[in-house]
Image: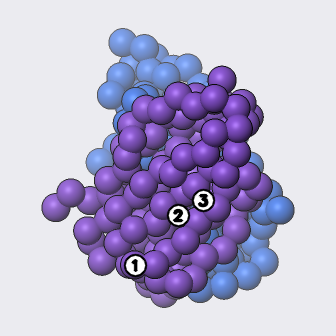
Amino acid sequence: ILNVEQSPQSLHVQEGDSTNFTCSFPSSNFYALHWYRWETAKSPEALFVMTLNGDEKKKGRISATLNTKEGYSYLYIKGSQPEDSATYLCAPTYNQGGKLIFGQGTELSVKP
Amino acid sequence: NAGVTQTPKFQVLKTGQSMTLQCAQDMNHEYMSWYRQDPGMGLRLIHYSVGAGITDQGEVPNGYNVSRSTTEDFPLRLLSAAPSQTSVYFCASSYAAQGPGANVLTFGAGSRLTVL
């Protein structure tokens, strides 16, 4: 059973705060790390796919970093807005791809 | 493009009944998968397929059956529904299970199933 851990489980911040959360995963035979954003009553949508150690991706105020040697990724949100409220999911893949096993997610709530 | 279409959106079953959740995609994706969403547990993989005629088990396959006779369709069958199968089910598809750009999933809108 693949152990993908995300922390914290939930996060409540004020509008304008910057925040970050963690995804930890087994590093052996790692291939890629996916981040998804999941708004309530909607379907998950892909944010980033990262493959290289030290890789950094950015989309607007959201960025992510990857450490494949120690098996973790950080997701950062700069100046959180209420529309950033969502559950953020990560999923590693192994051996050149294959099935996505998701962590349990970090639920972010941004209060105006 | 319709993307990933799931039907039905809502279903109520009695314990022991069987049913099929339909999933169809029109993007010529090789890879298709089914997940269930339960409170506090994120998305858990039930079954997946890397192409027509090929299926494999995910994390929680018991009580579910799948087949992949065409590239477009990946139905999920509940053989004898149990209250523990009450959940929201998501179908997702992507290009290629392997290689660069693989596995960027497009999700359907979800199917809410209640088993009484």
Chain A on-screen colour: blue
Q: Residues within 10 Å of mark 3 (few under 14, many from 20)?
A: many
- Mark 2 vs mark 3, foreground winner is 2
Distance CA(mark 2)–CA(mark 3): 14 Å
Image disc number at residue B70: 1
Is any part of residue A78 visible from this angle?
Answer: no
Q: In the image, are marks 1 and 3 on the same chain?
A: no
Q: Residue furthest top?
A: A112
Q: Residue at x 62, y 50 (%)?
A: B78
Which residue in the protein does label 3 denote?
A: A91
Distance CA(mark 1)–CA(mark 2): 14 Å
- Mark 1 vs mark 2, foreground winner is 1
Q: Amino acid at mark 1?
A: Thr
Measured as percent of width and height from the top left, residue A80 is found at 40, 29
Chain hosting mark 2: B
Q: Residue at x 51, y 51 (%)?
A: B20
Q: Amino acid at mark 3?
A: Ala
Q: Secondary structure at mark 1?
A: loop
Distance CA(mark 1)–CA(mark 3): 27 Å
Q: Is residue A14 left or right of residue A32?
A: left
Q: Residue at x 55, y 71 (%)?
A: B67
Which residue in the protein does label 2 denote?
A: B33
* Rendering quarter of residue A67: bottom right
Q: Are marks 1 and 3 in contact (CB under 8 Å)?
A: no
Q: Residue at x 69, y 64 (%)?
A: B58
Q: Residue furthest right?
A: A1
Chain hosting mark 3: A
Q: Secondary structure at mark 2?
A: strand
Q: Residues within 10 Å of mark 1 (few under 14, many from 20)?
A: few
